[in-house]
Structure formats: C-alpha cells, structure tokens
Image: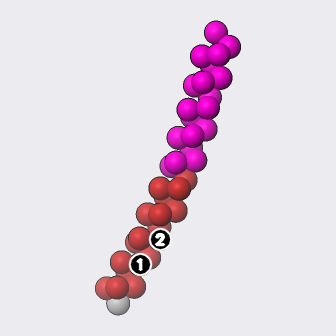
Amino acid sequence: MLFYVGTVTNQSFTVLFRECRNYYILFLKGLLKNMNST
C-alpha cells in the first residue's frame, strides 16, 4: 500500500515537473522574442 502511494506520488510529480518545464520553456521563448523585438 505504501509502495503504491509512493509510485502514484512519483508519477504525479513527474507529470508536474514536465508541465512546469514546458511552461518554463515557453516563458523563456517569449522573453527572447521580446528582447529581439525591442
């Protein structure tokens, strides 16, 4: 049971990390575009 909870938590953290990374990349790309346009 404890192992199951650990696996589920690990999976959700992995998904969360992936989402955050995607948003971070989008954010960086936006910053670069703004810098280039000015």
Q: Residues within 10 Å of mark 1 (few under 14, many from 20)?
A: few
The circle on residue 25 is none
Q: Residue at x 44, y 76 (%)?
A: 8
Predominant SS along the magenta part: helix
Residue 36 place in picture, x, y as percent: 65, 16
Tell me if residue 26 comes above or below residue 9 in the rendering: above
Estimate how packed mark 2 is, as few (under 14), some (14 to 19) or many (20 or more) residues with alpha carbons within 10 Å: few
Query: The N terminus appears in which quarter of the rendering?
Result: bottom left
Q: Residue furthest bottom?
A: 1
Q: Quadrant of residue 34?
A: top right
Callouts 2 and 1 close, C-beta under 8 Å:
yes
Q: Label 1's element?
A: helix
Q: Position of residue 21 (x, y in %)?
A: 52, 48
Judged from the image, the secondary structure of the residue bearing numbered disc 2 is helix
Q: Which residue is mark 1?
A: 7
Residue projecting furthest to the left: 2
The amino acid type of the residue labelled 2 equals: Gln
* Circle 1: residue type: Thr
- Give me the residue at 57% from left, 40% from top: 25
Q: Is residue 19 left or right of residue 33?
A: left
Distance from label 2 to label 1 (Cα)?
6 Å
Q: Is residue 1 magenta?
A: no
Residue 7 at x, y percent in the picture: 41, 78
Residue for point 55% across, 53% down: 19
Q: Position of residue 4 (x, y in %)?
A: 39, 85
Name the residue beneath numbered marker 2.
Answer: 11
Q: Which residues are magenta?
A: 20-38
